[in-house]
Every structure is written in C-alpha cells, then in structure tokens.
Image (cartoon, rainbow, N blue to C red):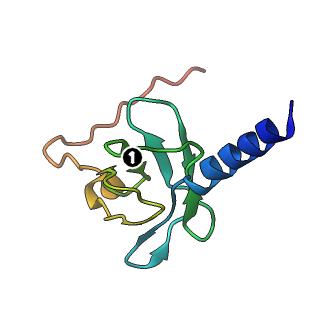
Amino acid sequence: MNLDAQNTASKSANNVQESLLKGIVADENGPLLGVNILLKGTTTGTFTDEKGAFTFPKALKQGDVLVFSFVGYDTKEIKLVGNLTMLKVEMTSDLNEILGTVDTNTPYKSKRSKRRN
C-alpha cells in the first residue's frame, strides 16, 4: 500500500469515528444505566453506561430510527434528522409496567390436599 492510500484509509477511519452518534439517556432523577438502544429493524445497538452515556457503534444517516427501551419506562423511538453528533433522550416512567395489573374480581381459593399416611 502506498503512502497516499494509507493516508486516505486513515482519514476514512477518522471520519467514521468522528461521525458516530453519542448521547445521554436520563429520566427526571438523572442518568439511566443499561438502557438498550437499537437501530430499528436491525440487531445493531448498544446500551448506556453508569453515566447514562452511549456511543452508537455504527455510523447513522438521516432518517434512521433509534429505539430506546428500559424496564419500567415507555419505549421511545427517535428519527434522526440532519447530521446529529450528540443526542439527549429523556425517558418517561411507565407505572403500569412496574405495577402490573391486579385482577380483583377473582376470589382466591385454596385447595386442600389429601394427606398421605
């Protein structure tokens, strides 16, 4: 490989590195650890660190949709517009998912088991 080809390859690698989307995911209480972030329709993704920060592992383009999901929170889809390099995402709590639903119309019945002697 000649010197020009090496420089071009190096510049291309740097451009890809520079164009990776970075961001922070938080809720009203602060950063969230472990939020899953996927490129919609693929298995490509990442998750947030202890500071709520992430770097998406693939260069993204305008129109791509990122899906943010975390237990106890509403799933959020964000369509990318323009040349974003930084993204701040605010997750909202889904109390129904945390609490679930309780059926109060069905009475509890215990079954007696026969004892073996």
Vertical comparison of 56 with 86: above or below: above
Q: Amino acid at mark 1?
A: Leu
Residue 17, position in %: x, y?
64, 52
Q: Where's residue 63, x and y in %? A: 31, 43
Residue furthest toward the left? 105
Q: Nearer the viewer, residue 55 or 43?
A: 55
Quarter of the image for residue 73 reads bottom left
Quarter of the N terminus within the rendering: top right
> Would you say 100 lies left or right of 35 here?
left
Viewed as shown, does residue 94 lie left or right of 35? left
Q: Is residue 108 left or right of residue 112?
A: left
Q: Decide which of 92, 90 is in the foreground and name it.
A: 90
Q: Image quarter for residue 99? A: bottom left
Give the residue displayed 77% in from the left and 45% down from the top: 7
> Residue 77 versus residue 27: which sits nearer the camera?
77
Can you say whether 105 is above or below 55 in the image?
Answer: above
Residue at 35% in and 46% down: 62
Q: Residues within 10 Å of mark 1 (few under 14, many from 20)?
A: many
Residue 58 image offset from top left, x and y in percent: 56, 42
Q: Is the residue 43 above or below the residue 22 in the image?
A: above
